[in-house]
Amino acid sequence: MSDPIRRPAPEGFLWGTAISAHQSEGNNVNSDAWLCETVPSSLYREPSRDACDSYNRYGEDIAIAAELGFNCHRFGIEWARIEPEPGQFSSAELDRYRRVLEACHARGLKPMVTFNHFTVPRWFAARGGFEVADGADLFARFAEVATARLGDLISYASTFNEANIQRLVGQFRRGPKAQMAIDTMLGECARDCGSDRFSSLLFAPVEGTEPVLVDAHLKATAAMKAGPGDFPVGLTLTMQDVQGVEEGHAAEALIQALYGPWLEVGKQADFIGVQTYTRVLWWGRRGLCRRPVTPSAPRRATSSTPRPWGARSASPMSAWVGRSSSPRAASPPTTTPVGSRMWRPPWPRSDAASRTALT
C-alpha cells in the first residue's frame, strides 16, 4: 500500500482540540449541573466528580495538544466559578483562566473560548435561569467582566455551545414519564437552593428560554466586542445531517424544528461552529431511523432493526446522558424499539421549510 499524499493545510487553517469546562475540569460545585448530578432523583448515571482534572492539569493537556501538531485549543470558562454568587466575581478564577490562555499561546495554540457550555451558576438556575428575561443581562454582565480580564489573550470566542441544544434534547424526552422524572429532579434541586424553581438549560422549555437565549447571545457579543481584544465572536450549533428518503418524509419539518431561529441569528455572527455527530434518515412514512431500512426485510426488534429517535431506554434520559455524567458526551439510544413501533414527531408534515438554509 503506497503512502498517502501529504498536502499542507491552507494558510490560516485551524486544526485543534476541544473540551468543555464542566465536563473536563472537575469539581464544578457551584454549577447547576453539579447539583443535578448529585440529588437523589438525578437522571445522570454518575456525577462528574474530578472529571479529567483539567482544572489542575490544563498545562499537561495543552502540552499534549501542541506535541500532536495542533494549532488551536477550544475550552470553556465556567461562569459558576467566575461568579459563584450574584455580582461576586472571583479574581482568582479569572487569573487562573488567564494562565490557561497564556499556556495556549506559549505552546503555539490559538485559544478559542466558549463562554457557556450548557452549565450556569446554581444561583442563576434557582432564580429562573434563561426563563427570566433579565437572564440575558446577567449573562452579558458575566461576558463583560470576563472579557475585561481575558480579552487581550482570546483568539476566537463563542457565546453558546450548541445554542439549539434544547431543540435536540426535546426529541428524546417524549411522554409524561420522562417529564415527570425531569420535574422530580429539578424540584429536588430547587429545594436544595431554598427556591421554588430551578431552571437548568438542558431541561428548560424551548418556548420560554429561546427568546432570552437569543437576547443573551446578542448582548454578550456586544460586551465581548467592546474589548479589550479584537477577536471574532460566534456561536456553535448542533447540526445533525437529516436526510429524507422516499415520498412522504418530513425531513424539512424536522430541520426547521431543530434550528428554529438560530440559523438566522448566526448570520449576524462572525462565524457559526458546525457540530455534527450523526446522520438521521427519515424513511417516508416509517419515521426517523439511524440506519437504512431494507423494504423487503422483516421488521424485527433485533440489533439490526433501525432505531428511531427517542426509542425507549432504561430511564427517561438515558438515551441522552448515555454512560457519561456530562450532557454533551451523549450517546444515542441503547435499546431497540418495542415491536415495530416507530417514533412519530409532534409536528405536522410540511414542506414549507427549505433545506437550502443548511448549505
Image (tube, helix red, strand yellow):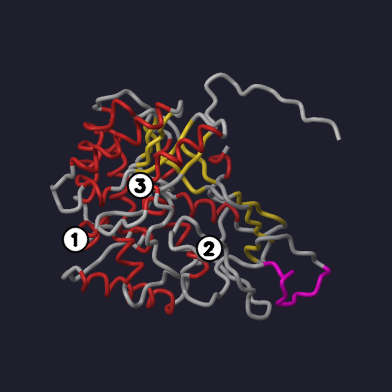
- Nearer the observer: mark 3 or 2; the answer is 3
Q: Amino acid at mark 2?
A: Pro
Which label number is shown at residue 292?
Answer: none
Residue 320: percent from left, percent from top? 49, 64
The residue range painted magenta reads 296-306
Which label number is shown at residue 56?
Answer: 3
| Structural crowding at the residue carrying mark 3, measured as other residues with C-alpha within 10 Å and reported as few (<14), some (14–19) or many (≥20) | few
Circle 3/circle 2 CB separation < 8 Å: no
* Above or below, comparing residue 348 to residue 108 in the picture: below
Circle 1/circle 3 CB separation < 8 Å: no
Tell me the quarter of the image containing the N terminus.
Answer: top right
* Above or below, comparing residue 278 to residue 58 in the picture: below
Circle 1/circle 2 CB separation < 8 Å: no
Disc 1 is placed on an element classified as loop
Disc 3 is placed on an element classified as helix
Among the two numbered marks 3 and 2 on one chain, the one whose residue lies closer to the N terminus: 3
Give the residue drawn at x 84%, y 31%. Answer: 2
* Above or below, comparing residue 68 to residue 323 in the picture: above
Most distant residue in the right direction? 1
Disc 2 is placed on an element classified as loop
Residue 175: percent from left, percent from top? 46, 75
Q: Amino acid at mark 1?
A: Arg
Which label number is shown at residue 348?
Answer: 2
Among the two numbered marks 1 and 2 on one chain, the one whose residue lies closer to the N terminus: 1
Which residue is disc 1 drawn over? 127
Q: Amino acid at mark 3?
A: Asn
Most distant residue in the left direction? 87
- Nearer the observer: mark 1 or 3; the answer is 3
354 or 209, which lies in front?
Answer: 209
Most distant residue in the top direction? 11
Residue 132: percent from left, percent from top? 22, 56
